[in-house]
Amino acid sequence: MTKNYRIGLIVPSSNTTMETEIPAMLQSRKNQSETFTFHSSRMRMLHVTKEELAKMDLESDRCAVELSDARCDAIAYACLVAIMSQGSGYHCLSESRLTGIAKENGANVSVISSAGALVEGIRTLGAKKVAIITPYMKPLTKMVVDYIEESEIKVTDSISLEVADNLEVGRLNPLNLLEIVKDLDISQADAVVLSACVQMPSLPAIQKVEERIGLPVLSAGTATVYQILKSLNLKTKVPNAGRLLSGSF
Protein backbone atom coordinates (compact mmCIF):
# COMPACT_ATOMS: atom_id res chain seq x y z
CA MET A 1 0.00 0.00 0.00
CA THR A 2 1.34 3.42 -0.97
CA LYS A 3 1.40 6.16 1.66
CA ASN A 4 1.45 9.82 0.69
CA TYR A 5 3.42 12.24 2.84
CA ARG A 6 2.66 15.97 2.80
CA ILE A 7 5.83 18.04 3.17
CA GLY A 8 5.35 21.63 4.34
CA LEU A 9 8.01 24.26 3.61
CA ILE A 10 8.28 27.67 5.29
CA VAL A 11 10.30 29.68 2.77
CA PRO A 12 11.36 33.25 2.01
CA SER A 13 9.16 34.75 -0.71
CA SER A 14 12.14 35.03 -3.09
CA ASN A 15 13.34 31.47 -2.46
CA THR A 16 13.14 29.08 -5.40
CA THR A 17 15.73 26.40 -4.62
CA MET A 18 14.24 24.49 -1.69
CA GLU A 19 11.07 23.87 -3.66
CA THR A 20 13.32 22.44 -6.39
CA GLU A 21 15.96 20.45 -4.48
CA ILE A 22 13.82 18.93 -1.71
CA PRO A 23 11.24 17.46 -4.14
CA ALA A 24 14.07 16.28 -6.42
CA MET A 25 15.73 14.40 -3.55
CA LEU A 26 12.59 12.83 -2.12
CA GLN A 27 11.14 11.87 -5.50
CA SER A 28 14.43 10.31 -6.62
CA ARG A 29 13.99 7.61 -3.98
CA LYS A 30 11.53 5.80 -6.31
CA ASN A 31 10.07 3.79 -3.44
CA GLN A 32 6.79 2.15 -4.46
CA SER A 33 5.42 2.39 -0.91
CA GLU A 34 5.63 6.20 -0.67
CA THR A 35 4.75 9.37 -2.52
CA PHE A 36 5.29 13.00 -1.52
CA THR A 37 3.45 16.24 -2.14
CA PHE A 38 4.90 19.65 -1.33
CA HIS A 39 3.17 22.66 0.20
CA SER A 40 4.75 26.06 0.84
CA SER A 41 3.99 29.13 2.89
CA ARG A 42 6.04 32.24 2.22
CA MET A 43 7.65 35.00 4.31
CA ARG A 44 8.46 38.28 2.54
CA MET A 45 12.18 38.74 1.87
CA LEU A 46 14.17 40.02 -1.11
CA HIS A 47 17.61 40.96 0.19
CA VAL A 48 19.71 38.90 2.56
CA THR A 49 20.41 41.46 5.29
CA LYS A 50 20.21 41.00 9.05
CA GLU A 51 17.40 43.55 9.33
CA GLU A 52 15.28 42.01 6.57
CA LEU A 53 15.88 38.50 7.94
CA ALA A 54 14.71 39.50 11.43
CA LYS A 55 11.56 41.10 10.00
CA MET A 56 10.90 38.02 7.86
CA ASP A 57 11.30 35.62 10.78
CA LEU A 58 8.31 37.23 12.50
CA GLU A 59 6.11 35.80 9.74
CA SER A 60 7.12 32.19 10.44
CA ASP A 61 4.33 31.82 13.05
CA ARG A 62 1.69 32.57 10.41
CA CYS A 63 3.33 30.09 8.05
CA ALA A 64 3.24 27.34 10.68
CA VAL A 65 -0.51 27.93 11.11
CA GLU A 66 -1.13 27.81 7.36
CA LEU A 67 0.82 24.58 6.85
CA SER A 68 -0.76 22.95 9.87
CA ASP A 69 -4.15 23.77 8.28
CA ALA A 70 -3.05 21.41 5.48
CA ARG A 71 -2.14 18.75 8.07
CA CYS A 72 1.37 18.35 6.70
CA ASP A 73 3.25 15.29 7.96
CA ALA A 74 6.53 17.24 8.18
CA ILE A 75 7.20 20.98 8.24
CA ALA A 76 10.63 22.49 7.56
CA TYR A 77 11.58 26.12 8.16
CA ALA A 78 13.76 26.44 5.09
CA CYS A 79 15.94 29.50 5.68
CA LEU A 80 19.19 28.80 7.47
CA VAL A 81 20.56 32.32 7.87
CA ALA A 82 17.24 33.74 9.13
CA ILE A 83 17.67 31.46 12.14
CA MET A 84 21.43 31.72 12.58
CA SER A 85 21.42 35.53 12.42
CA GLN A 86 19.18 35.59 15.52
CA GLY A 87 21.92 34.32 17.82
CA SER A 88 23.23 31.16 19.42
CA GLY A 89 20.79 28.27 19.76
CA TYR A 90 17.86 30.14 18.19
CA HIS A 91 16.90 27.10 16.09
CA CYS A 92 15.84 25.31 19.29
CA LEU A 93 13.57 28.20 20.30
CA SER A 94 12.13 28.58 16.80
CA GLU A 95 11.44 24.86 16.33
CA SER A 96 9.81 24.62 19.75
CA ARG A 97 7.62 27.69 19.18
CA LEU A 98 6.49 26.66 15.69
CA THR A 99 5.81 23.07 16.82
CA GLY A 100 3.63 24.46 19.61
CA ILE A 101 1.74 26.69 17.18
CA ALA A 102 1.07 23.75 14.85
CA LYS A 103 -0.13 21.58 17.73
CA GLU A 104 -2.44 24.32 19.00
CA ASN A 105 -3.95 24.24 15.51
CA GLY A 106 -4.59 20.51 15.76
CA ALA A 107 -1.55 19.22 13.85
CA ASN A 108 0.70 16.74 15.63
CA VAL A 109 3.89 17.58 13.74
CA SER A 110 7.38 18.57 14.87
CA VAL A 111 8.71 21.55 12.93
CA ILE A 112 12.37 21.26 11.91
CA SER A 113 14.66 24.03 10.69
CA SER A 114 17.40 23.93 8.09
CA ALA A 115 19.68 25.64 10.62
CA GLY A 116 19.17 22.93 13.21
CA ALA A 117 19.30 20.28 10.49
CA LEU A 118 22.72 21.43 9.30
CA VAL A 119 24.19 21.34 12.81
CA GLU A 120 22.69 17.90 13.44
CA GLY A 121 23.80 16.67 10.02
CA ILE A 122 27.41 17.61 10.75
CA ARG A 123 27.20 15.85 14.11
CA THR A 124 25.60 12.78 12.52
CA LEU A 125 28.61 12.46 10.22
CA GLY A 126 30.84 12.55 13.29
CA ALA A 127 32.55 15.70 12.02
CA LYS A 128 34.05 18.10 14.54
CA LYS A 129 35.63 20.44 11.98
CA VAL A 130 34.09 21.71 8.74
CA ALA A 131 34.90 24.04 5.86
CA ILE A 132 31.94 25.91 4.37
CA ILE A 133 30.83 27.85 1.30
CA THR A 134 28.10 30.48 1.53
CA PRO A 135 26.56 32.95 -0.95
CA TYR A 136 26.33 35.62 1.78
CA MET A 137 28.11 38.89 2.34
CA LYS A 138 31.02 38.37 4.72
CA PRO A 139 29.30 39.77 7.87
CA LEU A 140 26.45 37.25 7.49
CA THR A 141 28.90 34.44 6.80
CA LYS A 142 30.62 35.35 10.06
CA MET A 143 27.27 34.99 11.87
CA VAL A 144 26.85 31.52 10.35
CA VAL A 145 30.42 30.57 11.31
CA ASP A 146 29.89 31.84 14.86
CA TYR A 147 26.60 29.94 15.15
CA ILE A 148 28.17 26.68 14.00
CA GLU A 149 31.14 27.15 16.31
CA GLU A 150 28.83 27.91 19.26
CA SER A 151 27.40 24.45 18.51
CA GLU A 152 30.89 23.07 19.28
CA ILE A 153 31.85 22.48 15.64
CA LYS A 154 35.03 24.20 14.42
CA VAL A 155 34.86 26.02 11.07
CA THR A 156 38.35 25.69 9.59
CA ASP A 157 37.75 27.82 6.48
CA SER A 158 34.92 29.63 4.70
CA ILE A 159 34.25 31.21 1.31
CA SER A 160 31.69 34.00 0.91
CA LEU A 161 30.38 34.54 -2.63
CA GLU A 162 28.89 37.90 -1.53
CA VAL A 163 25.60 37.82 -3.43
CA ALA A 164 23.08 39.99 -1.57
CA ASP A 165 20.11 39.63 -3.94
CA ASN A 166 18.28 36.44 -2.94
CA LEU A 167 16.90 35.90 -6.46
CA GLU A 168 20.43 36.02 -7.84
CA VAL A 169 21.55 33.46 -5.24
CA GLY A 170 18.92 31.08 -6.61
CA ARG A 171 20.27 31.57 -10.15
CA LEU A 172 23.85 30.56 -9.30
CA ASN A 173 25.11 27.59 -11.29
CA PRO A 174 25.60 24.70 -8.83
CA LEU A 175 28.30 23.14 -11.02
CA ASN A 176 30.46 26.24 -10.46
CA LEU A 177 30.99 24.81 -6.97
CA LEU A 178 33.27 22.19 -8.54
CA GLU A 179 35.75 25.01 -9.18
CA ILE A 180 34.95 27.19 -6.16
CA VAL A 181 35.67 24.33 -3.75
CA LYS A 182 39.26 24.20 -5.06
CA ASP A 183 39.87 27.50 -3.23
CA LEU A 184 38.49 26.13 0.05
CA ASP A 185 41.13 24.96 2.52
CA ILE A 186 39.94 21.49 3.49
CA SER A 187 43.23 20.30 4.96
CA GLN A 188 41.94 20.45 8.55
CA ALA A 189 38.28 19.64 7.87
CA ASP A 190 36.36 16.45 8.60
CA ALA A 191 33.54 17.43 6.21
CA VAL A 192 32.57 20.16 3.74
CA VAL A 193 29.35 22.17 3.72
CA LEU A 194 29.06 22.90 0.01
CA SER A 195 26.13 25.28 0.48
CA ALA A 196 25.38 26.73 3.90
CA CYS A 197 22.25 28.26 2.39
CA VAL A 198 19.03 26.62 1.25
CA GLN A 199 18.70 29.09 -1.64
CA MET A 200 22.13 28.45 -3.17
CA PRO A 201 21.77 25.47 -5.55
CA SER A 202 24.25 22.67 -4.89
CA LEU A 203 22.55 19.29 -5.33
CA PRO A 204 24.08 18.41 -8.75
CA ALA A 205 27.56 19.01 -7.28
CA ILE A 206 27.29 17.25 -3.89
CA GLN A 207 28.24 13.71 -4.97
CA LYS A 208 30.81 14.91 -7.52
CA VAL A 209 32.67 17.01 -4.95
CA GLU A 210 32.48 14.26 -2.32
CA GLU A 211 34.05 11.74 -4.69
CA ARG A 212 36.73 14.23 -5.72
CA ILE A 213 37.88 15.35 -2.27
CA GLY A 214 37.31 12.14 -0.30
CA LEU A 215 35.46 13.88 2.55
CA PRO A 216 31.74 13.81 3.42
CA VAL A 217 29.95 16.67 1.64
CA LEU A 218 26.59 18.02 2.74
CA SER A 219 24.46 21.12 2.32
CA ALA A 220 21.69 22.86 4.21
CA GLY A 221 19.33 21.17 1.74
CA THR A 222 20.60 17.61 2.13
CA ALA A 223 20.67 18.02 5.91
CA THR A 224 17.06 19.21 5.86
CA VAL A 225 15.97 16.18 3.82
CA TYR A 226 17.80 13.91 6.27
CA GLN A 227 15.80 15.39 9.16
CA ILE A 228 12.53 15.23 7.19
CA LEU A 229 13.05 11.51 6.55
CA LYS A 230 13.99 10.90 10.19
CA SER A 231 10.87 12.70 11.38
CA LEU A 232 8.75 10.46 9.13
CA ASN A 233 10.57 7.30 10.32
CA LEU A 234 11.69 6.57 6.75
CA LYS A 235 15.05 5.21 5.63
CA THR A 236 17.46 8.11 5.21
CA LYS A 237 18.66 7.21 1.74
CA VAL A 238 18.69 9.42 -1.35
CA PRO A 239 20.82 8.51 -4.40
CA ASN A 240 23.72 10.77 -5.36
CA ALA A 241 23.21 13.18 -2.46
CA GLY A 242 26.31 12.60 -0.35
CA ARG A 243 27.23 10.43 2.59
CA LEU A 244 24.66 11.86 5.00
CA LEU A 245 21.90 10.50 2.72
CA SER A 246 23.65 7.23 1.93
CA GLY A 247 21.34 5.28 4.25
CA SER A 248 24.22 4.58 6.65
CA PHE A 249 22.93 6.89 9.39
Image: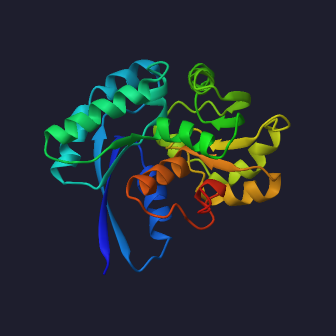
In the picture shown, does residue 157 fall above or below 113?
A: above
- Occupied quadrant, residue 232: bottom left
Between 173 and 99, the residue placed more toward the observer is: 99
Q: Is residue 178 above or below residue 61?
A: below
Query: To which quarter of the image does residue 196 belong?
Result: top right
Say which residue appears at 61% left-offset and 54% top-offset: 244
Horizontal relation, residue 27 to residue 187: left or right: left
Q: Is residue 174 left or right of residue 185?
A: left
| Residue drawn at 75 percent across, 43 percent down | 180
- Residue 96 x/y as whole percent: 32, 32
Identify which residue is drawn at 70% across, 40% down: 127
**Image location of residue 117, percent across then percent down:** 50, 41
Question: Residue 98 vs residue 246: left or right?
Answer: left
Quadrant (top left, top right, bottom left, bottom right) of the C terminus: bottom right
- 230 or 191: nearer the viewer: 230
Number of marks: 0
Q: Is residue 17 visible?
A: no
> How is the model colour-coded?
rainbow
Q: Where does residue 175 sit, x and y in percent of width and height?
A: 68, 55
Where residue 107 appears, as percent x and y from the top left, is 19, 48
Q: Which residue extends farthest right?
A: 187
* Position of the N terminus by quadrant: bottom left
Q: Is residue 76 visible?
A: yes
Decide which of 45, 102 is in the foreground and name it: 102
Residue 51 vertical placement versus 20 (above, below): above
